[in-house]
Image (tube, rainbow, N blue to C red):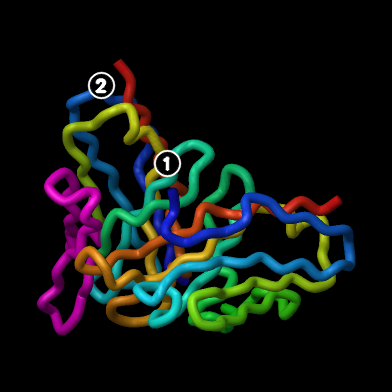
Amino acid sequence: QSVLTQPPSASGTPGQRVTISCSGSSSNIENNAVNWYQQLPGTAPKLLIYDNNQRPSGVPDRFSGSKSGTSVSLAISGLQSEDEADYYCAAWDDSLNGHVVFGGGTKLTVL
Amino acid sequence: QVQLVQSGAEVKKPGASVKVSCKVSGYTLSKLSIHWVRQAPGKGPEWMGGFDPEDGHGETIYAQNFQGRVTMTEDTSTDTAYMELSSLRSEDTAVYYCATSKASGWSIRFDYWGQGTLVTVSS
């Protein structure tokens, strides 16, 4: 069971806006920056959002992140077929001498 | 542009050890914070630990789940990082990744990833 909780699945049709949530606690999300990763089958994760809402260069502005208290959200607007992937949130957790925690992942299906 | 190239797949018996390498190019290893993340089949990523290069007195921070079983080292002469996991069990079957950040010093923002190394533990 993951420290950060994500819905196992999400879906949308092309052009739609979808949101993926990630909930944690005061030891991780509330007091630390959150990063989001996109993982296509058979490949390494790719950084999508860092520091809660920052996009690395090259990531389309269709992807955005937000944070409120112990939860964060990843929004994808103008959904495209190539967005079909697994999405993971991650953050530093201050417990157990400190460690990185990941969410269990959300499988996004583009219908 | 930082590139991380890992060693090839391994098959190990329970109780054995495995050592995975991560060759850095495009930057100097000593200035990077190299982390190791593994992903079991069908599961989310799991952080194993990372190196904090702060002020030249670098130290490795290990996840408590792996304390005593994992050792992360670096050879700055060849810009290669290593992760060795001992006392392997079937649950250690996973793809092991090295990862690092564009940001200097300690960072858990993983901009760059190796291609992954599949470690299979089977009798």
How far apart marks 1 and 2 lie (CA) works out to 16 Å
Residue with the most extreme top position: B123
Name above or below for residue B51 compared with residue A67.
above
Is residue B75 visible in the rendered image? The answer is: yes
Count of numbered circles in the view: 2
* Coordinates of residue B2 in the picture (x, y in percent): 43, 68
**Location of residue B93 in the rendering, given as x and y in whole percent from the top left corner:** 37, 33
Residue B56 colored in magenta in the image: yes
Q: Which residues are magenta?
A: B51-80
Q: Is residue B15 magenta?
A: no
Relative side of A28 to B14, left or right? right
Q: Are marks 1 and 2 in contact (CB under 8 Å)?
A: no
Residue A5 is situated, as x and y percent measured from the top left of the image, at 52, 59
**Residue type at mark 2?**
Lys
Q: Is residue B58 left or right of residue B9?
A: left
Who's the residue at 49% across and 43% down the image? B43
Q: Chain of mark 2?
A: B
Chain designation of label 1: B
Residue where numbered disc 2 is placed: B13
Q: Residue A65 got which mark?
A: none
Q: Quadrant of residue B99?
A: bottom left
**Measuring 51% from the left and 77% from the top, which residue is drawn there?**
A50
Q: Which residue is mark 1?
A: B95
